[in-house]
């Protein structure tokens, strides 16, 4: 009985695909995990690097939509993570490493100083009014910080 080279290779490939254990019949062992120390690089800093660009500590990463009200201060430091206007409701969402209580106090203070008055609050949602407009600020605890949603 003669087999062609293609037929023989096909049989070998089909036989190899059905194997569930590695050669030798041993079941795969779980991988060992090892904690790695941060090492000396953890102490590196660019504080004395004359070519490193200084990073401001109070900044917002991202670009606000052009229709975002200019009289609404946003919380910093933060990063813009989403924006849109589904169903006509315009919003932006920011993430920050600051806990919700710190964000709540700062946002309330900033908005009050720019003429917004607090009209309602239920813990996670803050409602402000100014000149017939309403602004809702919704805070979501991310456990590693806060997501801030401005609905305008």
Image (cartoon, rainbow, N blue to C red):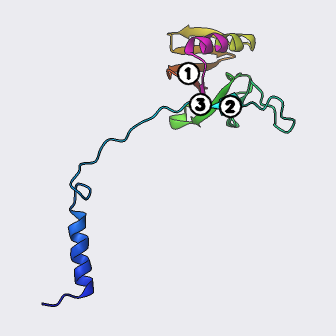
Tag in front: 1 or 3: 3
Q: Which numbered disc flags the more N-terminal residue, 2 or 1?
A: 2
Tag in front: 2 or 1: 1
For this rendering, which residue is in front, 75 or 45?
45
Among the 4 quarters of the image, the one containing residue 133: top right
Q: Secondary structure at mark 3?
A: loop
Q: Magenta stretch: residue 100 in it?
A: yes
Mark 3 crowd level (few <14, some 14–19, many ≥20, 10 Å Cα): few
Q: Which numbered disc flags the more N-terminal residue, 3 or 2?
A: 3
For the residues labelled 2 and 1, the Cα–Cα distance comes to 23 Å
Residue bearing mark 1: 145
Q: Position of residue 55 (x, y in %)?
A: 77, 30
For the residues labelled 3 and 2, the Cα–Cα distance comes to 42 Å
Vertical comparison of 72 with 49: above or below: above
Q: Residue at x 25, y 59 (%)?
A: 23
Q: Which numbered disc flags the more N-terminal residue, 1 or 3?
A: 3
Q: Residue at x 22, y 83 (%)?
A: 7
Among the 4 quarters of the image, the one containing residue 135: top right
The magenta segment is: 91-107
Q: Magenta stretch: residue 59 in it?
A: no
| Badge number at residue 38 | 3
Confirm or deny contact between disc 2 and disc 1 (CB under 8 A).
no
Q: Quadrant of the N terminus?
A: bottom left
Residue bearing mark 2: 68
| Badge number at residue 48 | none
Vertical comparison of 113 with 75: above or below: above
């Amino acid at each position: 009985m003669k087999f062609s080279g293609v037929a023989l290779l096909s049989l070998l490939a089909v036989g190899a695909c059905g194997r569930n254990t590695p050669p030798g019949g041993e079941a795969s062992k779980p991988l060992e995990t090892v904690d790695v120390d941060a090492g000396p690089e953890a102490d590196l800093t660019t504080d004395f690097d004359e070519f490193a660009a200084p990073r401001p500590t109070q900044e917002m990463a991202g670009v606000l939509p052009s229709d975002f009200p200019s009289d609404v201060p946003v919380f910093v430091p933060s990063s813009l993570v989403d924006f849109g206007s589904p169903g006509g409701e315009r919003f932006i969402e920011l993430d920050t490493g600051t806990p919700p209580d710190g964000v709540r106090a700062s946002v309330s203070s900033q908005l009050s100083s720019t003429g917004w008055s607090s009209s309602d609050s239920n813990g996670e949602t803050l409602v402000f009014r100014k000149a017939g407009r309403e602004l809702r600020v919704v805070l979501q605890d991310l456990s590693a910080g806060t997501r801030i949603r401005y609905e305008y």
